[in-house]
Amino acid sequence: MKKRCEWGNQSVLYQQYHDEEWGVSLHNDQTLFEFLMLESAQAGLSWETILKKREGYREAFDQFDVEKIAKYSDDKIESLLQNPNIVRNRLKVKSAVLNAQLFLEVQKEFGSFDKYIWQFTDGKTIQHSFKKMRDIPANTPESDAMSQALKKRGFKFIGTTICYAFMQAVGMVNDHTTDCFRHEECVV
């Protein structure tokens, strides 16, 4: 049996996500937008809840097509609020549309969201060497700076803890514990 981060053993869903996605360095704007949306939706909920609804989000939000989401009408928002396959929180759904619009502005200004967002780690993965999950912080100066910058641009549901979880998910930081088989695999 593979040794993995403690949380990766809590369910089959967590195990698959941990082993295949978490901490892998991502640079595709659409995938970065997907994680930004999912992390924002997760605020106040468990990540497992969001993973269980991930396919529902993909279907409801046009496979995370940021250009389509940015143009969602009030009627579309109302229909999303009736969809049991996503988190039906009005503020979160409306913020997804707003964040899509702002995401497009960042792309236009910087050429890609990837180029913008990775500046918070100087374009490379921050390699941590935590031995235990309890040693991993909920936020860092980098996630504080990212949150502050995104909020200044108008993004919603983007606090420092959400930003840090996003950074972990998309491989901006390697927070696999040192005894986890993925730790070395995620060293870039």
Image (cartoon, rainbow, N blue to C red):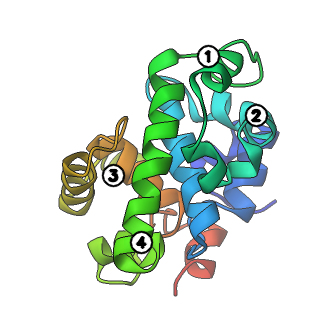
Q: Residue at x 30, y 50 (%)?
A: 137
Q: Secondary structure under badge 2?
A: helix
Picture coordinates of residue 160, whole percent (x, y): 27, 45
- Whether tag 3 and tag 1 are in contact, CB under 8 A, the answer is no
Q: Which mark is residue 88?
A: 1
Residue type at mark 2: give it.
Answer: Ala
Badge nearest the viewer, 3 or 1: 1
Q: Which residue is mark 3?
A: 135
Q: Secondary structure at mark 1?
A: loop
Q: Residue at x 71, y 18 (%)?
A: 79
Q: Is residue 5 visible?
A: no
- Crowding near pointer 1: few (<14 within 10 Å), some, many (20+)? some
Between disc 3 and disc 2, the foreground one is 2
Closer to viewer: mark 4 or mark 3: 4
Quote the CA–CA distance across marks 1 and 2: 11 Å
Q: Does 174 sit left or right of 136 as displayed? A: right
- Name the one closer to the observer, 24 or 53: 53
Question: Looking at the picture, does residue 158 appear above or below residue 90?
Answer: below
**Looking at the image, residue 96 lies above or below residue 133:** above
> Which residue is under mark 2?
60
In the picture of the structure, the residue carrying the numbered disc 4 is 108
Amino acid type, label 3: Asp
Structural distance between the alpha carbons of marks 1 and 4: 30 Å
User: How many marks overall?
Assistant: 4
Q: CA distance from mark 3 to mark 2?
A: 37 Å
Q: Nearer the viewer, residue 119 or 51?
A: 119
From the top left corner, tell me how far across and down residue 105 is, in percent.
39, 61
For the N terminus, the image quarter is: bottom right
Image height check: is 182 above or below 7? below
